[in-house]
Image (cartoon, grey):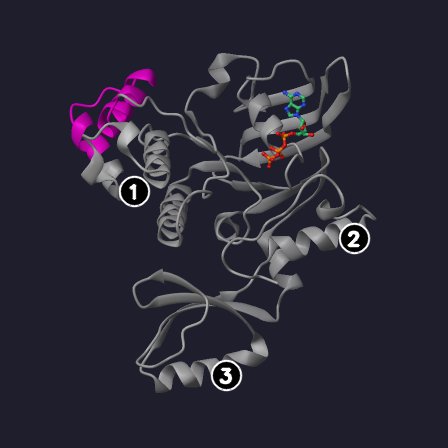
Amino acid sequence: MSLALEFSAVSKVFRSRARSVQALQDVSFEVDEGEVFGFVGPNGAGKSTTIKIMLDVIDDYQGEVRLYGLSAREAASRKGVAYVPESPALYEQFTPLEILRMALDMYGIRRIDADIWCRQWLDRFSVGHVADRRMRLLSKGTAQRVALAHALVVSPRLLVLDEPLSGLDPVGRKDVVDILSEYKRDGGAIFFTSHVLHDVERIADRFGFIHQGQLITTRSPRDLVADRADRFIVRYQAGEGFAAAGEAIRTGEFEHELAQTELPDFISGLNASGGRIVTLKPAVSLETMFFKILAEGGLPRPAETAGTLRPSGLDCG
Ligand SMILES: Nc1ncnc2c1ncn2[C@@H]1O[C@H](COP(=O)(O)OP(=O)(O)OP(=O)(O)O)[C@@H](O)[C@H]1O
């Protein structure tokens, strides 16, 4: 398998008269074609700097960065690469449909069914009903869905996402995770950054843990599951009178993390109420893993330094 992305010994120092900040220090990792790689770390760890380097927004750094074998310093390396920033700034005076059409034009994609294709992508992100409304009239979450549709409409081979789920409600997060899973199934590669834990964990093949500019380790979900073999995420439809715990995913459907020992009582209570389990899978917690890795390396927890790791709506602890 060839590589979508390679970072080799990349270092970046921001210098000003007052001080120097070592944003990245000797960072090396690879992302295979078709692989989903999550880059996880607290505020100020170096995640955005990493993305800016791969997109050539920052070009004064040490080391080597390659996309599909070409240096990131060459524009051609970004052919078929789509990027969604944390706070997308899409042209306010245009409509979502116009914005997606512009993306096709920019990527040189000609389709006779371009309008239908764009509307289908807007529908996939449940924003088809605002296809002809001006962007400035849309809410933050809706604009974020448009930005994701804008990235996927060009059928990218690598999707770079900065905090892809921030600003979305639980339903929105589930929709996006489902669409990204499908994109991955179809062979697309994803590099995403996150400090909002849990939702994105399930689509990643590997995680890189970054702290104070250093890539501490990369781990697979299998490692994380092994670490947390005694906890499960249960998604269920609650029956009549069942005291639903956890996060509402959609009407009547909830998601909740449980210890293995709590499962039998939970399942019998759910069955008695006429509810049912939708999915049951081992819990992985990046947060737990992250702190364990820091402790093993004798590194300070982010709370003791500049940043924080913040869990999402579900308490994974
Ligand atoms: N233009 C800049 N000038 C000076 N320092 C910078 C600049 N951009 C980033 N930094 C510093 O580099 C370090 C890494 O920042 P970066 O934005 O990459 O972190 P991050 O992991 O993306 O954080 P967050 O999760 O808050 O977005 C931080 O200490 C930050 O203050």
Q: Viewed as shown, does residue 187 lie left or right of 291?
A: left
Residue 125 numbered tag: 1
**Is the Cβ of the residue at disc 3 closer than 8 Å to that at disc 1?**
no
Q: Is residue 286 above or below residue 188?
A: below
Instruction: Report the residue at 31% width, 68% height from top.
Output: 252
**In the rendered view of the protein, which quadrant contains the C terminus?**
bottom right
Instruction: Verify whether residue 295 appears in magenta.
Output: no
Label 2: which secondary element: helix
| Disc with the residue nearer the chain's start (3 vs 1) | 1
Task: Indicate which quadrant contains ligand 1.
Answer: top right
| Disc with the residue nearer the chain's start (3 vs 2) | 3
Instruction: Pinpoint residue 162: horizontal percent, then vertical percent.
Output: 51, 34
Mark 3–mark 1 distance (CA, rounded to whole Å): 37 Å
Instruction: Report the residue at 75% width, 41% height from top.
Output: 305
Question: Which amino acid lies under the numbered mark 1 shown in the image of this protein?
Answer: Phe
Magenta stretch secondary structure, dominant: helix
Instruction: Pinpoint residue 21: horizontal percent, then vertical percent.
Output: 74, 24
Residue 109, quarter of the rendered image:
top left
Magenta residues (range): 94-119
Residue 126, quarter of the rendered image:
top left
Instruction: Pinpoint residue 125: horizontal percent, then vertical percent.
Output: 29, 42
Question: Which amino acid lies under the numbered mark 2 shown in the image of this protein?
Answer: Ala
Mark 3–mark 2 distance (CA, rounded to whole Å): 34 Å
Label 1: which secondary element: loop
Question: Which amino acid lies under the numbered mark 3 shown in the image of this protein?
Answer: Pro
Instruction: Report the residue at 37% width, 30% height from top.
Output: 151
Residue that mark 3 sits on: 264
Residue that mark 2 sits on: 295
Mark 2–mark 1 distance (CA, rounded to whole Å): 40 Å
